[in-house]
Amino acid sequence: MDMSLAGEKRFLKLTELEELRYDAYENSRLYKEKTKKWQDQHIRNKSFKVGDKVLLFNSRLRLFPGKLKSKWSGHFVISRTTLYGSFELEVGNNKFMVNGHCLKHYFCKDEVGLIECMRLDPLDPKPPFG
């Protein structure tokens, strides 16, 4: 047994292992970059103005979760905006600040028109989806 030959083989195996580790690190970095690029393409910018009606996401709905209970509460009115994406919401006389990521637009109809009522008429022999 030659100790110098065994040591040289061991050194080659360690350098090969180091190269494999470096390749795995590089592949992981490339995968993360591609994933971030794909996720950033699917971000939708929300723009809110003062006076818009919005819904607020209720993230604390864990104590009594209902299957059909909505996690969106509201409707609130935006009273002030800041440069960094936070908004001041107003309900009656109460005002509070929230992050813009927790909001979505609230589109409502204050009155139900005659056409919507006619569609829901149970005596209509013709179904609305026919």
Image: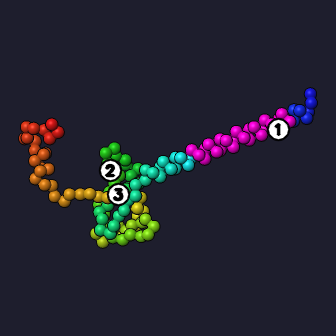
Q: CA distance from mark 3 to mark 2?
A: 13 Å
Residue 101 or 22: which is nearer the viewer? 22
| Magenta region, residue range | 8-31
Question: How many discs appear?
Answer: 3
Q: Is residue 94 visible?
A: no
The N terminus - image quarter: top right
Q: Amino acid at mark 2?
A: Ser
Residue visible at 53% across and 46% down in the picture: 34
Q: Quadrant of the C terminus?
A: top left
- Way the structure is coloured: rainbow
54 on left or right of 114: right
Residue underneath mark 3: 104
Camera-near label (1 vs 2) is 1
Q: Are marks 3 and 2 in contact (CB under 8 Å)?
A: no
Query: Which is more foreground, mark 3 or mark 2?
Result: 3
Residue 11 is labelled as 1
Q: Which mark is residue 70?
A: 2
Residue 109, given in percent of the width and then of the height, sits at 20, 57
Residue drawn at x 82%, y 38% is 11
Spatial CA distance of label 1 from label 2 is 62 Å
Please state which amino acid type lies under the numbered disc 3: Lys
Q: Residue at x 41, y 50 (%)?
A: 62
Q: Which element carries disc 1, helix, strand or loop?
A: helix
Residue found farthest to the top: 1
On the rendered structure, is 127 left or right of 4? Answer: left
Residue at image coords 23%, 57%: 108
